Image (tube, helix red, strand yellow):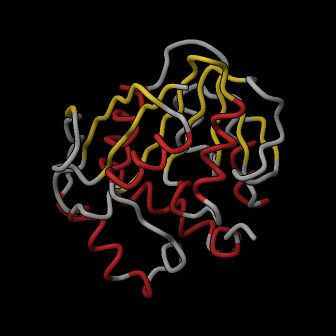
Amino acid sequence: MPRVEPFEKHLERYESWFERHRHAYLSELEAVRKLLPKEGKGAEIGVGTGRFAAPLSIKLGVEPSRAMAEMARKRGIEVIEGVAENLPFPDESFDYILMVTTICFVDDPERALREAYRVLKPGGALIIGFVDKNSPIGRHYEEHKEESVFYRDARFFSTEELLELLKKVGFRKFGIVQTLFHRLDEIKEIEPVKPGYGEGSFVVIKAVK
């Protein structure tokens, strides 16, 4: 079962995170934008309330939480209710797929990545944004999981673990950028986006089919 209950019950708390940590959110957005293809047909899997899809001009999303899907629709996104492990699209439908933090909440990460691979056209790209579990923010989230209604059931990945999983599924040609070089409560302006990983807490991987 997709872990939607916290997102159904605590929608306002979820939305308020983006206001409280506005500069961190905008930094994450810039990191995703760096690797997102500039053209082609795309969709966001785990679109949530549309906080990434809307500013990135992605018009289609998949989301298991009805409450979040409704909010995303208000932001102008067409949302199909569904899960990452069973995407409601034919093979080779998209030029790119975006997943931001979604991989932490799916029941079967490998199957979710296989589904993304299936619906991508040859040469298409999967862009994954996530908090690296070996980073300062990742370690903080892991240590305080029980206190968070959202992260209690999350599974965090290191960049190396995700790269291994992506290779196992068949992806190749990886691009990686990172941002968020301070603790969340210390981020008072938009952080830089740097190539690679190992310093920043938020990492974006682009993987090509």
* Residue under the image location 64 percent in, 68 percent down: 7
Q: Quadrant of residue 113?
A: top right
Which residue appears farthest toward the bottom when viewing the image? 146
Q: Of residues 188 and 124, which is closer to you in this image? A: 124
- Residue 51: x and y in percent read 54, 44
Position of residue 14 relative to residue 49, above or below, is below
Which residue appears farthest toward the top when viewing the image? 39
Position of residue 85 relative to residue 108, above or below, is above
* Residue under the image location 69 percent in, 42 percent down: 115
- Residue 37: x and y in percent read 49, 19
Q: Of residues 74 and 66, which is closer to you in this image? A: 66
Q: Quadrant of residue 1?
A: bottom right
Q: Of residues 18 and 47, which is closer to you in this image? A: 47
Position of residue 89 relative to residue 129, above or below, is above
Question: Quick one: quadrant of the C terminus?
Answer: top right
Q: Is residue 87 left or right of residue 10?
A: right
- Residue 185: x and y in percent read 23, 64
Q: Of residues 36 and 189, which is closer to you in this image? A: 36
* Residue under the image location 36 percent in, 56 percent down: 131
**Image label count:** 0
* Residue under the image location 42 percent in, 55 percent down: 19
- Residue 208: x and y in percent read 49, 25
